[in-house]
Every structure is written in structure tokens, then in C-alpha cells.
Image (spheres, rainbow, N blue to C red):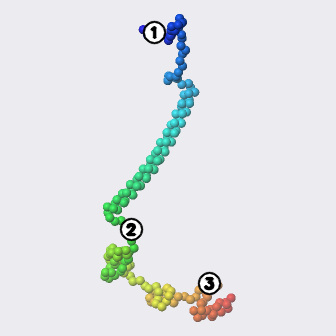
């Protein structure tokens, strides 16, 4: 019963049937690719794969940078939390060590910011040795101390130069030595 029928409308005034013109339009239908179209699609696929690879690499880079930032912040949080929980931290503090304090052979180290005693311990052998004074009373400069006598030695007043020994006036022999030097030349 499903016979195709032509759309024929009958005009009551005419005896001949009227034929309608065909209607044109578009539909989604299957179309096989040509070799040229397959090649174009393959190029587009390769470009899309390269773009995806670049995007994934950027994502990894950004993700690793953000992870490093998060790790750094987490580390700071852990350090700060530890300080708060402990209630202290180690810092460089100026101290002073006094010898033979509180008794001979002992030394005491105190903080200079709070004057609190840090430790009290026995002095080492080197610390028990007395230091020799390097200046003499009434002298403004350093003096050489004789190891054998323990007394200051007189500093040398003569200077050796390329042409020989030159005495200073403080030596009291300056002119005699100069005359001797002149007589040699």
C-alpha cells in the first residue's frame, strides 16, 4: 500500500493535473573522502597532536612550578609552626667570658643582652697561661719583649738600605756612620 504518489493537485476548473516543482535543500549524508581530503585531514591531525603536546608540556611546567611554590610555602609554615610550638630559636648572641670566675681555674660565659650565665666551666691549659704585656708603661708604641729577661728590648734604630746601613739621629752615631759610608765609596 505504500505506493509513491505524485503530488498532483487537481484544479477543479481544469481537467489537467498540476505538477509541483522539486524542492531543493541540504542533509547530512555520508561522503567518502578523496585521497586529497585524507591527506589534508592527516596534516590537521599531526598539527593538533603537536599542539596538544606543547599544551601538556606547558601544563607540566606550570604544575611543577606551582608544586615547588606550594612546597616552599609548606616548608615555611612548618618552620614557623615549630618555632611557635617550641617557643624559641637559636640566634647569634654576643657573649663575654670572664676568667678565674667564680674561682681560680674556672671561667664563666654570660650573655651580654640579658647578663644571664650561659655556662661555667674549667679553664683550659692555654687559658691559664698569663699573657705578656706587649706595651711598656710610658711608651705609646709596642715594644719587643725579650724571651730570656722578660724586659722590653730597645728597638733597632738603624735601617738597612740598598747602599748600606743608615743610622738615625736617635742612635747618636748618625753622622759618624754616614762619614764612614762616604769614605768607603
- Secondary element at tag 1: loop
Residue 82, numbered circle: none
Residue 100 versus residue 151: which sits nearer the camera? 100
Residue identifier under label 1: 3
Query: Relative to residue 177, is residue 2 drawn left or right?
Result: left
**Marks 1 and 3 close (CB-CB < 8 Å):** no
Q: Position of residue 171 (x, y in %)?
A: 57, 92
Q: Which residue is drawn at 56% across and 24% down?
A: 34
Q: Which of marks 1 and 3 is in front?
A: 1
First-in-chain label (2 vs 3)? 2
Q: Which residue is drawn at 43% across and 10% down?
A: 2
Would you call the spot at circle 3 few (<14 residues within 10 Å), some (14-19), or many (20 or more)?
Answer: few
Q: How many labels does the image show?
A: 3
First-in-chain label (1 vs 3)? 1
Residue 91, numbered circle: 2
Q: Nearer the viewer, mark 2 or mark 1?
A: 1
- When the figure is inspected, residue 54 is found, relative to residue 154, above or below; the finding is above
Residue 110 versus residue 6: which sits nearer the camera? 6
Residue 161, numbered circle: 3
Amino acid at each position: 500500500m505504500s505506493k509513491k504518489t505524485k503530488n498532483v493537485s487537481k484544479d477543479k476548473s481544469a481537467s489537467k493535473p498540476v505538477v509541483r516543482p522539486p524542492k531543493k535543500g541540504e542533509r547530512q549524508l555520508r561522503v567518502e573522502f578523496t585521497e586529497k581530503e585524507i591527506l589534508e585531514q592527516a596534516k590537521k591531525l599531526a598539527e593538533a597532536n603537536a599542539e596538544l603536546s606543547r599544551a601538556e608540556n606547558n601544563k607540566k611546567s606550570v604544575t611543577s612550578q606551582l608544586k615547588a611554590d606550594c612546597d616552599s610555602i609548606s616548608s615555611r609554615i612548618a618552620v614557623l609552626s615549630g618555632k611557635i610550638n617550641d617557643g624559641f630559636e637559636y640566634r647569634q648572641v654576643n657573649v663575654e667570658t670572664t676568667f678565674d670566675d667564680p674561682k681560680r681555674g674556672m671561667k664563666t660565659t654570660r650573655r651580654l643582652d640579658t647578663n644571664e650565665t650561659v655556662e661555667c666551666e674549667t679553664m683550659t691549659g692555654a687559658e691559664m697561661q698569663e699573657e705578656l704585656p706587649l706595651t711598656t708603661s710610658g711608651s705609646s708604641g709596642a715594644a719587643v719583649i725579650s724571651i730570656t729577661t722578660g724586659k722590653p728590648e730597645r728597638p733597632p734604630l738603624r735601617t738597612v738600605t740598598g747602599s748600606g746601613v743608615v743610622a738615625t739621629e736617635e742612635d747618636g752615631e748618625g753622622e759618624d756612620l754616614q762619614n764612614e759610608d762616604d769614605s768607603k765609596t
